[in-house]
Image (tube, rainbow, N blue to C red):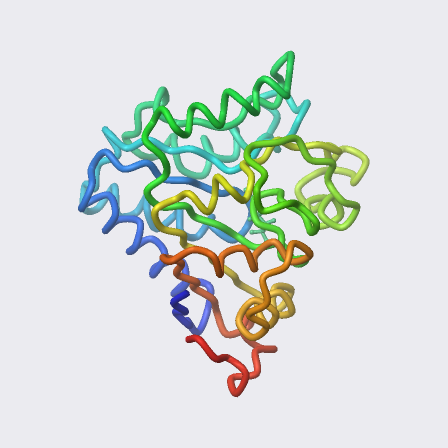
Amino acid sequence: MKLIRTPHYQELSMKAAAIIIKTIQTNPTAVLGLATGSTPTGTYERLIKDHVENGTSYKDIRTINLDEYVGLPTEDINSYRSFMERKLFSAIDINPKNTYLPNGNAVDIQDECARYDQLIQSIGGIDLQLLGIGENGHIGFNEPGTPFTETTHVVELTHNTRKANARFFKNIKDVPTQAITMGIKNILESKAILLLASGENKAEAMARLLTSHKTTESFPASSLFQHQNVTVIADEAALSLVDDSKRSAF
Ligand code: F6R
């Protein structure tokens, strides 16, 4: 696990975008695993700026997102599909047919999970998976206690995760109770992983990730210790509780 420290969110976003752009330049048909939420939005802004100013093309890039709420209409402002359209897809030259998210409105959501696993395989696996981290260490919507062997599955969202996401909705009652998420097994099968953490609310999770080195299902991000190519980019606020004397492997 490689750690890149940045003074603030803006630089975190620049560094993350630079890694993604390099991946695209090296492999113009790359499969990018993408995330939603507050953390990657600055990175997406940088990718758009680079696309406009430098012409980096997404013509043959495929994207596959980590997760989607169950039961929100696609056009709902809070669906992850509409988030991705607004924050990235509509501003770059990606072919909409090459952008994949789970279908949270599938008639049979279990079948949808199996379909998503097959889709990941059929597009050749994920070259670079972008991740945020939950305050409880979740990655994707893999909440504490999720077996690391899980592939795409339906999750009941915890009260804390719904509370954290309620900021985007009018009322916490409007936050869906279920989501479809790639499993930790899918995430670990990606060729490279880029985890971003910004802000004081992530400081406890980052302290645990960077100093404990214990792989445990009660802290999903610790599954990343099992992967050989993980880069973490974190800003000072997210690193504020990290005791450097205990930070062994970085
Ligand atoms: C989003 C996702 C989640 C978020 C995490 C952090 O697709 O999978 O794991 O990355 O909840 O969210 P933010 O960035 O809003 O703090």
Task: Give the residue at x 41% y 54%.
Answer: 194
* 58 over 212 or under it: above or below: above
Quarter containing the C terminus: bottom left
Say which quarter of the image contains residue 125: top left
Residue 49 pos. (x, y %): 30, 47
- Depth check: 46 or 200 in front? 200
Task: Give the residue at x 21% y 46%.
Answer: 53
Classify residue 147 as left or right of residue 28.
right
* 193 over 168 or under it: above or below: below
- Depth check: 141 or 47 in front? 141
Residue 35 pos. (x, y %): 49, 43
Residue that sits furthest to the bottom in the current view: 245
Say which quarter of the image contains residue 169: top right
Quarter containing the N terminus: bottom left
Task: Give the residue at x 69% y 56%.
Answer: 218
Task: Give the residue at x 43% y 27%.
Answer: 100
Residue 144 pos. (x, y %): 69, 51
- Give the total number of marks visible in the rendering: 0
Residue 18 pos. (x, y %): 28, 56
Classify residue 4 as left or right of residue 183.
left
- Depth check: 139 or 203 in front? 139
* 69 over 74 or under it: above or below: below
Say which quarter of the image contains residue 118: top left
Residue that sits furthest to the top in the current view: 107
Classify residue 82 as left or right of residue 176.
left
- Depth check: 119 or 75 in front? 119
